[in-house]
């Protein structure tokens, strides 16, 4: 089917496709602390190998370090039971750290535009936009959005500056592209772990049900025998004798 046009953004939000923004490639490359960046990547690899469940919380501050950003985050697209698409900030750091877990509208956010276009984006948002979505945080003077997807799950990795209008450069873009792959892998891992946990819980419930069935089988069988004897015209002595016999066998 033919793609529909992206909805017009609310006032105060600017999202630019990096593929069509030649001025971004011409930005001056800032000096970088290579040793610090290597150490950050080594730490990320260590966490991924030893504590993969914590990789998202580690990846976000590392994104800040590698890009000299004021804040960074990972956004996950989700659909509510009412079939409403939205975004959730599942990991944040820096000036936007207090807003982890916040939910944003799907159709009125830079993340939504990024996923709609399917390409990395440069974005800025003003105080007007932040007031519109109810976030009391510093405006974004420069930001990079990298889309990622794994299986049927999508989201974005982003870094932002709160002061400089042109902090990020093409080297930051390449770094974030690689980190977005880590984010996708980490989200897949967490999803698989959740499924395994659910399966384990289901198996445990089944085991408990089997144990319960065994526990109630003897008294249930005794009751059935009693009812059978009564239906065959057995005397009270036969009935209570049967019960006594069952008690003795417990």
Image (cartoon, helix red, strand yellow):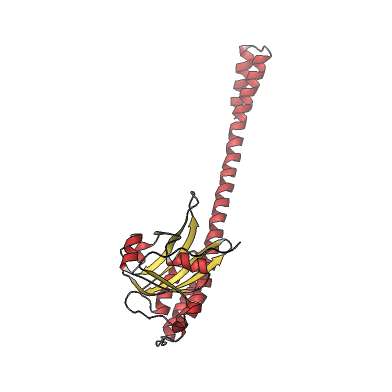
Q: What residue do we see at 58% from left, 34% from top? A: 215
Residue 104 spot, x, y in % from top left: 41, 60
| Observer-nearest of 59 and 47 | 59
**Corner quadrant of residue 239:** top right
Residue 36 spot, x, y in % from top left: 42, 82
Camera sees residue 23: yes
Q: What residue do we see at 58% from left, 40% from top? A: 209
Q: Is residue 138 above or below residue 197?
A: below
Q: Residue furthest right?
A: 232
Residue 164 spot, x, y in % from top left: 34, 79
Q: Is residue 218 above or below residue 75?
A: above
**Corner quadrant of residue 10:** bottom left
Q: Quadrant of the C terminus?
A: top right
Camera sees residue 137: no
| Observer-nearest of 191 and 216 | 191
Q: Give the mark count.
A: 0
Residue 80 spot, x, y in % from top left: 48, 52
Q: What residue do we see at 66% from left, 15% from top? A: 231
């Amino acid at each position: 089917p033919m793609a529909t046009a992206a909805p017009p953004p609310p006032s105060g939000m600017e999202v630019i496709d990096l593929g069509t923004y030649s001025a971004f490639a011409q930005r001056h490359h800032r000096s970088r602390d290579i040793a610090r960046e290597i150490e950050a990547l080594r730490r990320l690899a260590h966490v991924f190998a030893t504590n993969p469940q914590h990789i998202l919380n580690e990846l976000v501050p590392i994104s800040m370090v590698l890009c000299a950003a004021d804040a960074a985050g990972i956004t996950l697209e989700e659909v509510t039971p009412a079939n409403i698409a939205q975004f959730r900030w599942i990991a944040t750091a820096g000036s936007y750290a207090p807003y982890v877990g916040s939910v944003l509208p799907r159709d009125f956010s830079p993340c939504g535009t990024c996923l709609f276009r399917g390409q990395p984006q440069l974005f800025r948002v003003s105080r007007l936009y932040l007031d519109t979505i109810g976030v009391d945080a510093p405006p974004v003077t420069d930001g990079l959005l990298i889309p990622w997807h794994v299986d049927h799950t999508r989201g974005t990795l982003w870094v932002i500056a709160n002061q400089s209008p042109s902090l990020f450069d093409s080297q930051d873009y390449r770094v974030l592209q690689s980190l977005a792959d880590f984010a996708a892998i980490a989200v897949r891992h967490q999803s698989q772990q959740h499924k395994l946990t659910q399966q384990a819980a289901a198996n445990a419930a089944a085991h408990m049900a089997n144990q319960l069935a065994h526990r109630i089988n003897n008294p249930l069988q005794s009751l059935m025998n009693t009812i059978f004897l009564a239906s065959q015209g057995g005397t009270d002595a036969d009935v209570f004798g049967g019960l006594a016999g069952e008690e003795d066998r417990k």
